[in-house]
Amino acid sequence: MLIIAISFIFAACIFYSIGVWAEKIQKRLRSWHLVVFWLGLISDTIGTGAMGILSGSMFKFNFHGITGMLAIVLMLFHAVWATIVIARRNESMILQFHKLSFVVWLIWLVPMITGMIFGATV
């Protein structure tokens, strides 16, 4: 189970980072970014769920648990909002979306890094 959890968390890191950085470099939200945002969210949710099963608790009221929950909620908001922006075809929003993506990605990194460093005990 640990291998599965780590694999999905690692996949989330790859998907989400590729999507956010590609969008930031291209300075334009594209449909394929949506795919990797959603894959990152799904992977992170599965990996987090597997970690929760391993730890015996789906949520721990500590720094890692709170920032992890915040990160998943923000990733969900981010993916849904990106989908809406693409669907609306609003050029201004498409060109500005990378700013939101980068902030969400930075916040998402906090539980990712603390989980690796401290083994999710913080």
Image (cartoon, helix red, strand yellow):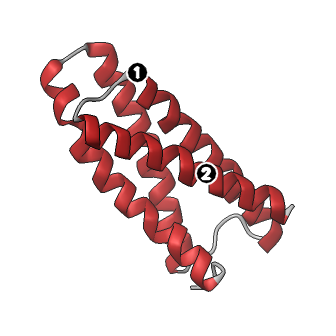
- From the top left corner, tell me how far across and down residue 94 is, in percent: 22, 26
- Spot the residue most to the right: 1
Q: Which residue is mark 2?
A: 44
Comparing marks 2 and 1, which lies closer to the viewer? 1
Q: Give the SS element for disc 2.
A: helix
Three-letter amino acid code at disc 1?
A: Ser
Q: Quadrant of residue 59?
A: bottom right
Q: Is residue 33 above or below residue 61?
A: above
- The quarter of the picture where the N terminus appears is bottom right
- From the top left corner, tell me how far across and down residue 72 is, in percent: 51, 53
Residue 60 visible in the displayed image: yes
Residue 56 visible in the displayed image: no
Q: Is residue 14 left or right of residue 1?
A: left
Residue drawn at x 82%, y 68% is: 54
Label 2 to label 1: alpha-carbon separation: 20 Å
- From the top left corner, tell me how far across and down residue 107 is, in percent: 37, 62
Q: Which residue is mark 1?
A: 31
Three-letter amino acid code at disc 2?
A: Asp
Q: Which mark is residue 81?
A: none
- The quarter of the picture where the C terminus appears is bottom right
Q: Is residue 69 left or right of residue 4?
A: left
